[in-house]
Amino acid sequence: MSNIINLSKLQNIGEELLNHYLFVACDNELYNMRQGEPYLITHSELSNLIYFAYGVTLSINETKIVYNHMINKIK
């Protein structure tokens, strides 16, 4: 069951993740830097990261909002 989270909270989650993890973006894809190598992070992996970091389960659409916000902040 997904928690309903407003847009600003979703954007804040994306910005906090950017502050704590190293991500790069290329061609509207999000990469996590693992041991210096870019690793493509999927929506599912991002959802899992958010769950472990914040204890919330996001819907696919909510996760896409966070994902896209992170890409736009990096570019």
Image: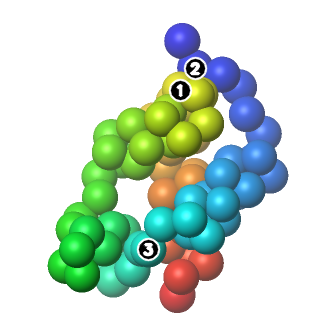
**Residue 22's mark?**
3
Residue 39 coordinates in the image, percent (x, y):
21, 68
Left or right for 24, reference 36: right
**Residue 57's mark?**
1
Left or right for 34, reference 59: left
Distance from disc 2 to disc 1, alpha carbons, whole Å, reads 5 Å
Q: How many C-alpha atoms fall within 10 Å of the one at disc 3: few (<14), some, or many (≥20)?
A: few
Residue 19 coordinates in the image, percent (x, y):
61, 70
Residue that appears at 33% across and 68% down: 32
The reply to whether the C-beta atoms of the residues labelled 2 and 1 are less than 8 Å apart is: yes
Q: Is residue 28 visible?
A: no
- Which residue position is annotated with label 2? 2
Q: Amino acid at mark 1?
A: Thr
Vertical placement of 14 versus 37: above or below?
above
Identify the secondary structure beneath mark 3.
Answer: loop
Q: Is residue 52 visible?
A: yes
Seen from this angle, which residue lies furthest front?
35
Identify the secondary structure beneath mark 1.
Answer: loop
